[in-house]
């Protein structure tokens, strides 16, 4: 084991119904946006709450999940990986088998159906690893929306395959050259666009972050992951798992898996951030280890910032974890102790990527490889009677060329 090696069982203080009416999870969340977006957020919250109570909305969404997305996704017992690692049995929630190759489609389907109910004609989105951009472009094509996706130019370089996929689907990818040229800057540009086009445009924010009601909405759409996993593990093992593990960028796949298990206090929950090259400023995206509470892009949460409040640069081998802040609901569960957080560095994530490839024939996304690495650490500490479920949030096709570049492999 390396880095932050200690694996402590979380201690949970049961929360009230969250978020509150102002969009706060304890002290985290809220709506820190320009006046031009306040009414749009109120409109969106009202539309979402009405849709969420509408049985016909759920019937259509469930039909699309089944017939278009390919849900339910399997819960796969990774026996070869478990045998290689030793210790606990490892199960993988196979979100990589969704249409488009990641969990992101769960959220974009829900938001596209919501946007159609609201009479919007255009979708915009931000993307880092490109999977949310592809998922947004996919539903835009499916439902006939015009679509623009903002993407940092550094991520455009790292994820050129996904850029081409978005173009094929009829979406315009708009590179962002400001700042760090990564996810944070793409979100800023998307918010700027939305503030000028709210009458016709819906912003499909891709993670459980941003101003209320986005963290609530995205968690709600993604919680299908945990609801399925709960039924599946009970069918396979006759009991709930001892632990669940998910990588954490903004927080959508983590909250999607964890939310249906929050009240099951015997299930330990572990979120895994990007440890990057080191925990020095600008070398990682481990918000809970070195961040401080602040406000960024519409939400009060843990943020990587210097003592003057300036946002620090981030780094991760995975574009989807390379972000300066984290979702407010995860911040709340960090402070209450319900979810324990650690980080995995680039090198260890790459090792886990290769181990899963060679033991199970599964190429994980580099984001998901961080969760696999922590699951390996945890499984080695637990006995063979224990069970761990890890969220395999996406497949690694998009990362193959970046892995090759890092390894110095060239193609003639």
Image (tube, rainbow, N blue to C red):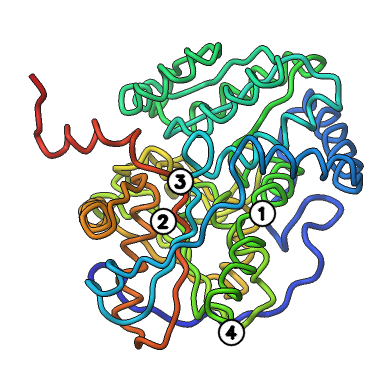
Q: Quadrant of the C terminus?
A: top left
Question: Where is 358 relative to 33, above or below?
Answer: below
**Where's residue 396, x and y in %?**
34, 41
| Residue beneath the point at 25% across and 54% down | 278
The residue that disc 2 covers is: 273
Q: CA distance from mark 4 to mark 2?
A: 23 Å
Residue 350, compared with residue 246, is above or below; it is above
> How packed is label 2: few (under 14 Cα within 10 Å), some, or many (20 or more)?
many
Residue at label 3? 96
Q: CA distance from mark 2 to mark 3?
A: 19 Å
3 or 1: tag closer to the N-terminus: 3
Label 2 vs 3, first from the N-terminus: 3
- Give the residue pinned by disc 1: 224
Mark before the other along the chain sequence, 4 or 2: 4
x and y percent of residue 286 in the render?
A: 40, 55
Work out how far the residue at label 1 is from the one at label 4, CA to CA, in angstroms: 21 Å
């Amino acid at each position: 084991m390396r880095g932050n090696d200690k694996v402590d069982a979380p201690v949970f203080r049961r929360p009230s119904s969250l978020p509150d009416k102002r969009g706060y999870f304890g002290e985290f969340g809220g709506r820190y946006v320009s006046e031009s977006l306040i009414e749009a957020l109120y409109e969106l919250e009202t539309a979402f709450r009405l849709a969420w109570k509408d049985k016909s909305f759920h019937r259509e969404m469930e039909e699309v999940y089944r017939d278009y997305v390919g849900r339910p996704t399997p819960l796969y017992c990774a026996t070869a990986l478990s045998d290689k690692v030793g210790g606990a049995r490892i199960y993988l929630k196979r979100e990589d088998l969704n249409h488009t190759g990641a969990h992101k489609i769960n959220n974009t389907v829900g938001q596209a159906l919501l946007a159609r109910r609201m009479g919007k004609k255009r979708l915009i989105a931000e993307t880092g690893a490109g999977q949310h951009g592809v998922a947004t472009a996919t539903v835009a094509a499916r439902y006939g929306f015009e679509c623009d996706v903002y993407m940092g130019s550094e991520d455009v370089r790292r994820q050129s395959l996904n850029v081409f996929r978005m173009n094929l689907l009829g979406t315009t990818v708009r590179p962002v050259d400001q700042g760090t040229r990564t996810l944070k800057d793409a979100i800023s540009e998307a918010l700027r666009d939305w503030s000028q086009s709210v009458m016709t445009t819906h912003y499909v924010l891709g993670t459980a972050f941003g101003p209320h009601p986005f963290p609530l909405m995205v968690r709600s759409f993604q919680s299908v992951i945990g609801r399925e996993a709960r039924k599946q593990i009970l069918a396979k093992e006759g009991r709930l798992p001892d632990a669940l593990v998910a990588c954490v960028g903004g927080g959508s796949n983590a909250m999607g898996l964890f939310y249906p298990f929050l009240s099951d206090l015997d299930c330990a929950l572990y979120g895994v951030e990007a440890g990057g090259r080191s925990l020095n400023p600008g070398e990682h995206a481990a918000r809970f280890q070195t961040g401080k509470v602040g406000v960024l892009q519409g939400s009060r949460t843990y943020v990587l910032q210097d003592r003057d409040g300036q946002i620090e640069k981030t780094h991760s081998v995975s574009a989807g974890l390379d972000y300066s802040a984290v979702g407010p609901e995860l911040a709340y569960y960090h402070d209450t102790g319900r979810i324990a957080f650690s980080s995995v560095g680039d090198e260890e994530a790459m090792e886990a990527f290769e181990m899963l490839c060679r033991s199970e024939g599964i190429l994980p996304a580099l984001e998901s490889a961080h969760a696999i690495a922590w699951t390996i650490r945890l499984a080695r500490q637990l006995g063979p009677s224990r069970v761990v479920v890890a969220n395999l949030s996406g497949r690694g096709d998009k990362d193959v060329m970046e892995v090759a570049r890092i390894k110095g492999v060239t193609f003639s």
